[in-house]
Image: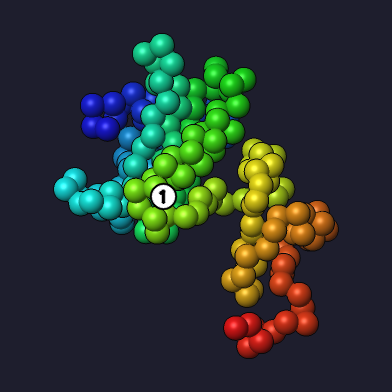
Amino acid sequence: FDATFVESWKVYETYQVEIHDDVKSECEKKRYRRFLVDSPLTHEANAADGFGSFHQQYWLDNELIAVGVIDILPTCVSSVYLYYKPDYGFLSLGTYAVLREIAFTRELGRSCPSVTNYCMGFYIHTCPKMRYKGNFSPSYLLCPETYTWHPIEKCRALLEQHKYARFEDESIGDEDRA
């Protein structure tokens, strides 16, 4: 990763400015490092489990076109962030990265059976850039009040009507959950 740090940061900077309309001065190396490189998860090179934070780089014809930041945890692979060269947006790199990360999770699960889940990270229903995440099945959203998982199909109607929604049935109180 260190060998391609500057190249990766440049892709991030371009992505943030062109896709998210960030000011270039807000995308400096120090902020990039703090946001996506520094991690409370540490990777031990000799550890058999391989848990930690990683950058998956996507190359095309010797050009770095996208980077997916993931956390490998004892029970899941968690997608943290994806950034890419905007010129390659037509490739739907977010969707491609999800498919690669799902395949990676399945492969990892064969050697580490405790890894059984893939988490796509934040889902903001009103954000068009995140809507693609709901196209994968099965997908579940966490109820913000009861911390129980619910199929996204059952949550969509609530999210269309309300910015904030409880997914668990109102008749089930927190104390009723087993």
| Residue displayed at 75% across by 59% down | 155
Residue that appears at 63% across and 75% down = 146
Q: How is the image coloured?
A: rainbow
Query: How many numbered badges does the structure rendering display?
Result: 1
Q: Residue 57: percent from the left, percent from the top?
A: 39, 29
Q: Residue furthest left?
A: 46
Q: Is residue 82 visible?
A: no
Q: Which one is nearer the viewer's eye here, 140 or 49? A: 49
The residue tagged 1 is 109
- Above or below, 123 against 67 in this view is below
Q: Residue furthest front?
A: 110
Query: Percent x, y for residue 131?
Result: 68, 42
Look at label 1 and name its amino acid: Gly
Residue 117 visible in rendering: yes
Q: Residues within 10 Å of mark 1 (few under 14, many from 20)?
A: some
Question: Front-most of 127 and 73?
Answer: 73
Give the image location of residue 132, x and y in percent. Answer: 66, 39
Q: Judging from the image, what secondary structure is the residue with disc 1 in?
A: helix
Identity of the residue furthest to the top in this view: 61
Q: Is residue 141 left or right of residue 32?
A: right
Reply above or below: 97 against 130: above
Q: Quadrant of the C terminus?
A: bottom right
Indicate whether 132 appears above or below 24: below
Q: Horizontal placement of 25 versus 6: left or right?
A: right
Residue in view at x 78 percent, y 82 percent: 171
Q: Position of residue 34 (x, y in %)?
A: 34, 46
Quarter containing the N terminus: top left
